[in-house]
Image (tube, rainbow, N blue to C red):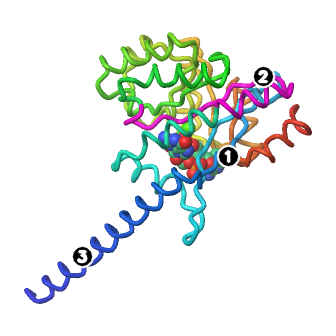
Amino acid sequence: AKKKGNDNIQFYTEDMHESNLRRLSIEKDLRQAIENVGLELYYQPKVDLRRGCIAGMEALLRWKHPVQGNIPPTVFIPIAEESGLIHPLGEWVLQQACIQNKAWQDVGYPKMRMAVNLSPHQFRQQDLPERLAHILRETGLDPEWFELEITESSLMEKTEETMVMLRRLKALGVHISIDDFGTGYSSLNYLKQFPIDCVKIDKTFINDIVESQKDSKIAYAIIGLAKSLDLRVVAEGVESVEQLSFLDKHHCDEIQGYYFSRPLPAAVFESLLQDRLWF
Ligand code: C2E
Ligand code: CA
Ligand code: CA
Ligand code: CA
């Protein structure tokens, strides 16, 4: 039994070793990708159900590794967070998203809100408001057309500091949205006090909204809660017409998901703006 135990331990450590190596090599390659701009932003539309048009888009990072191919953000963002690379990376995303939205506005497309995801570390960075103000000024994008998506769980940590940071960000004139709503543990009290504009219902609730009574009740309750607090409500991960009609029936404001469009490279998103602005 002892021998077997040892084998298991050895097996376990070799596994750990391998995953550490992979992590280190991803970190090294990511550093290089940031320097040589080996990254790209994709854009996924959010459709306004009442007006039937694209109200905005979410910028989502894509990394095509030269050897390993596409590495999903769910893999490299946590590594960027642990290594501190999230700061140059996040800065690049903010800047790129502002440049792109301003460029589309300058061409004459209807004005739309560009949303960017903020990781927990970025949100805790003390000079974030000044950095963002600088980027908005430099790119000339009106803050009204810019939105930050911050996860519910990162907002509910250190709520005093959260309040201060949210107020400083709000003072810039940007929109703020709670991402992955329903998966954290919001206190309704904070939800009421925080200067936020929008909640995004997490896609885990949208998945089974048609089959599961529990999930449809949760989604329904979140929509009601958001409305009662005068917040815009967005559903993410909408893939079917059945999900869409449920959300439409219950007056969800905006829909994001494969049903309308996957996240698209800038040039393809732009052709969407030309053909399918109205749904
Ligand atoms: P998120 O912010 O919750 O983004 C939504 C995710 O759902 C995206 O995955 C999107 O591609 C995917 N999605 C959209 N519609 C559907 C649908 O109908 N069905 C399904 N199954 N999925 C859908 P993605 O692009 O892989 O991003 C994963 C996560 O990585 C994001 O979750 C976000 O937390 C993070 N992330 C992505 N880009 C950035 C970034 O620029 N900065 C930071 N800090 N995080 C990012
Ligand atoms: Ca998001
Ligand atoms: Ca989300
Ligand atoms: Ca998520």
Q: Which residues are magenta?
A: 98-122
Task: Say above or below: 82 vs 176.
Answer: below
Query: Percent x, y for residue 214?
Result: 52, 39
Q: Secondary structure at mark 2?
A: loop
User: Can residue 204 be seen at all in this image of the molecule?
Assistant: no
Q: Nearer the viewer, residue 14 or 29?
A: 29
The amino acid sitting under disc 1 is Tyr
Q: Quadrant of residue 11?
A: bottom left
The earlier-in-sequence mark between 3 and 1 is 3
State the quadrant of the N terminus: bottom left
Residue in the foreground of this view, choosing between 240 and 117? 117
Give me the disc on residue 12.
3
**Residue at 85 percent of width and 27 percent of height:** 109
Residue labelled 3 has its Cβ within 8 Å of some atom of ligand 1: no
Residue assigned mark 1? 42
Calculate the distance from the C-alpha at mark 1 to the C-alpha at mark 2.
18 Å
Badge 2 is on which residue?
A: 111
- Tag 3 and tag 1, C-beta contact below 8 Å: no
Do tag 2 and tag 3 residues touch (Cβ < 8 Å)? Answer: no
